[in-house]
Image: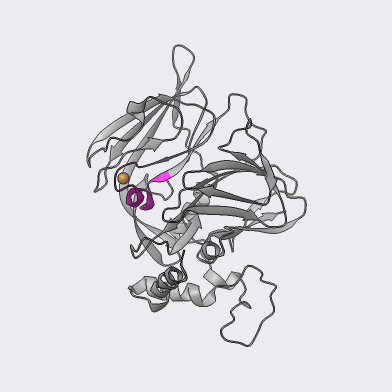
Amino acid sequence: MSEQSKVSRRDVLKLGSAGALGLAGSYFINNLAPFSSSVKAESNNKNHSNMDHSQMVGDITKTSGYKMAEQLLTTFDYGKASKLPNGQTLREYEVVAIDKEIEIAKGIKFPGWTYNGTIPGPTFRCTEGDLLRFHFENQGSHPHSIHFHGIHPTEMDGLEPIAPGQKFTYEFVAKPYGLQVYHCHVLPLARHIHKGLYGNFIIDPKTPREPALELNMVMNGYDLDLDGENDFYTVNGYAFAFMNHPIKVKKDQLVRIYLSNLTEFDLINSFHLHANYFTYYPTGRNDNPSQFTDTVMQCQGERGILEMRFPYKGKYMFHAHVSEFAELGWMGFIEAE
Ligand SMILES: [Cu+2]
């Protein structure tokens, strides 16, 4: 992206062209610190690197946005399960598209289009071979659909818009195992997705994975002024959610992250872990070549599973390795205890 575009998106925040956005935006800009909080204080006004991260956003735990991001981290929607006569598991999910204002950073609201009231939407989960029924109802103001990644009949592919007030049931057998994503597929696509209609969809292998602390993370962005560029970047919808309130794990415990990128308007997003390495399984496939690394990038719609253990007690930072994304909300800590 050009230098000009960077200036323009930051100018929006600095100049405060719109009420709360302006105030909160300039608060963020004026208090942004580079990643290392150990950088020594300098008297130069222009250098804010002496800011402690804990001062950056204040207490956010009471905010609806933080609660949403934290809930999405460890909540998996298995639907309503029952057994069919042939022994197959049937899972039925209720999905409602609803317009809802979402708090995406402290004091900043985004006029979202959501599945079940959160951005990202719920993390649907099942096992390979299950019969799935997604009972979709569009209570929103625009036509929407659910397009699932995976292998299924084309009439269940979510290309058909479901008008406001209408219902549709998507039915297919869950395959293949791995990490899938889902999103609205109504045109203009970028706008329908960007408004918040996306989420993770986990199909577990029939032989369960090794027990682990499992975390769901969807990388996204928010374009508040509709200029086709994101003004905030987050995991699970809320900027800086895990900065002051690190994700707690146990030292040496196996941690598994289901990571996807549903960021619009930027070609790639990335995940970088400090002071540690992880094993990466593209699309959550154990049979894929995996990497042992500390940074992975994903294009839009790409996803994968990260597995790691934390060998030392302490706070491990994680963030987009696109620095601008990190400074605009996409960074946090995992704390090993
Ligand atoms: Cu839509």
Task: Tell me the residue at 63%/55% (across/down).
Answer: 272
Report whether 62 appears left or right of 208.
left
Q: Identify which residue, 245 or 97, lies in the foreground.
A: 97
Stretch of the chain drawn in magenta = 185-198
Task: Tell me the residue at 57%/86% (across/down).
Answer: 45
Picture coordinates of residue 325, whole percent (x, y): 52, 62
Looking at the image, which residue sits at the far right? Answer: 312
Per the image, is 143 magenta?
A: no
Per the image, is 194 magenta?
A: yes
Judge whether residue 122 can be spotted in this image.
no
Q: Identify which residue, 287 or 254, lies in the foreground.
A: 287
Q: Report the coloring of the rendering.
A: one colour
Picture coordinates of residue 191, whole percent (x, y): 33, 52
Picture coordinates of residue 148, whole percent (x, y): 41, 35
Looking at the image, which residue sits at the far top? Answer: 86
Report whether 49 appears left or right of 227.
right
- Tell me which image quadrant ligand 1 sits in: top left
Looking at the picture, does residue 135 appear above or below residue 116?
above
Looking at the picture, does residue 121 appear above or below residue 170?
below
Q: Identify which residue, 174 or 186, lies in the foreground.
A: 186
Looking at the image, which residue sits at the far front? Answer: 2
Looking at the picture, does residue 126 appear above or below residue 7?
above
Picture coordinates of residue 193, whole percent (x, y): 37, 48
Task: Using the rendered view, name the quadrant where residue 112 is placed.
Answer: bottom left
Q: Identify which residue, 65 or 230, lies in the foreground.
A: 230
Looking at the picture, does residue 264 appear above or below residue 53?
above
